[in-house]
Amino acid sequence: AQKVTQAQTEISVVEKEDVTLDCVYETRDTTYYLFWYKQPPSGELVFLIRRNSFDEQNEISGRYSWNFQKSTSSFNFTITASQVVDSAVYFCALSEAQGGSEKLVFGKGTKLTVNP
Amino acid sequence: AAGVIQSPRHLIKEKRETATLKCYPIPRHDTVYWYQQGPGQDPQFLISFYEKMQSDKGSIPDRFSAQQFSDYHSELNMSSLELGDSALYFCASSSGASGRESDTQYFGPGTRLTVL
C-alpha cells in the first residue's frame, strides 16, 4: 500500500531563513510519481513539482529545490531565503502508474509559517 | 492559461438535503478526480473518471455518486447530507489515463460545503 509521511506538522521560521520540508514515502511499485503541492490560506492546491521514480536528478526552481533519494525513499523540499508569502501548508503526494489507479495519496501536510 | 473551474465555490445545506458540485476540467484534459478535504486534514481521494467511465473509486460514501459527461465536465451528487460531510471538495484534471503514464493533476479552487 502507498503511504506518505510528513513528520513535521508545523514549522515556524523568520524571513530569509532556509527551511527544508521532509517527505518519506512507501510503495511497492517500481514506477511511481511524487508531487509537492502548496495550499495557501486561501485554500487552493497549487502544483509545485512532479518527479518520476526513474529520475533522481535534483531540481531547482528559483528559491525552491527538491532532493529525491530513492535509497531512503525521501523527496525533500527546500525553500531558500524564505518569504512571508511562502506561508502555507505544503503537501507531498504519491501516485502509482501501474494497476490503473493514478489517485494521489497525500501526506498529512506541513504547515509553514514565515514570520517577518 | 485556463484552469479547472468548480461551482459553486461555497454551499450551505441542511442535514438530509442533497447537493450537486460541478467541475469543468482544463480544456483537452480527459481525466477528472474528486477529493474531499476535512478541516485540518489532507485531501482524500473519492472517485475518478477517464473518458466518461469511472476509472477508480476511493472512500466515497454510498450516498455520493458522480459522473463525467460528454463534454468532460463532472458532477458529484451528494444525498442525505450529514454534518460530517462538511469539507472542501476538490476536483482535479489531467490528461493522463488509467494504465498510461501518470500526468500531473491540476486542482480547481474547491467547493466549500457546510452542512448545518
Image (cartoon, rainbow, N blue to C red):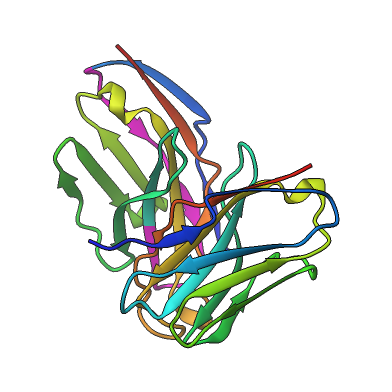
Left or right, A57 with respect to A71, comes to left
Residue A69: tell me if it is visible.
yes
Q: Report x, y in % for residue A34.
A: 38, 58
Residue A75 on the magenta segment: no
State which quadrant residue B27 falls in: bottom left
Left or right, B32 with respect to A35, comes to right
Residue A28 on the magenta segment: yes
Vertical relation: B83 (above or below) A85: below
Q: Report x, y in % for residue B5.
A: 42, 61
Closer-to-camera residue (A6/B84): B84
Residue visible at 33% across and 61% down in the picture:
B3
Q: Quadrant of the N terminus of chain B?
A: bottom left
Closer-to-camera residue (B57/A26): B57
The number of numbered badges drawn on the structure is 0
Residue visible at 44% across and 51% down in the picture:
B109
Vertical relation: A40 (above or below) A83: below
Closer-to-camera residue (B5/B50): B5
Vertical relation: A64 (above or below) B3: above
Range covered by the magenta-colored residues: A16-34
Residue visible at 53% across and 30% down in the picture:
A9
Left or right, B20 with respect to A57, comes to right
Q: Report x, y in % for residue A40.
A: 41, 36
State which quadrant residue A35 falls in: bottom left
Q: Quadrant of the C terminus of chain B?
A: top right
Residue A1: tell me if it is visible.
no
Q: Report x, y in % for residue B110.
A: 50, 52
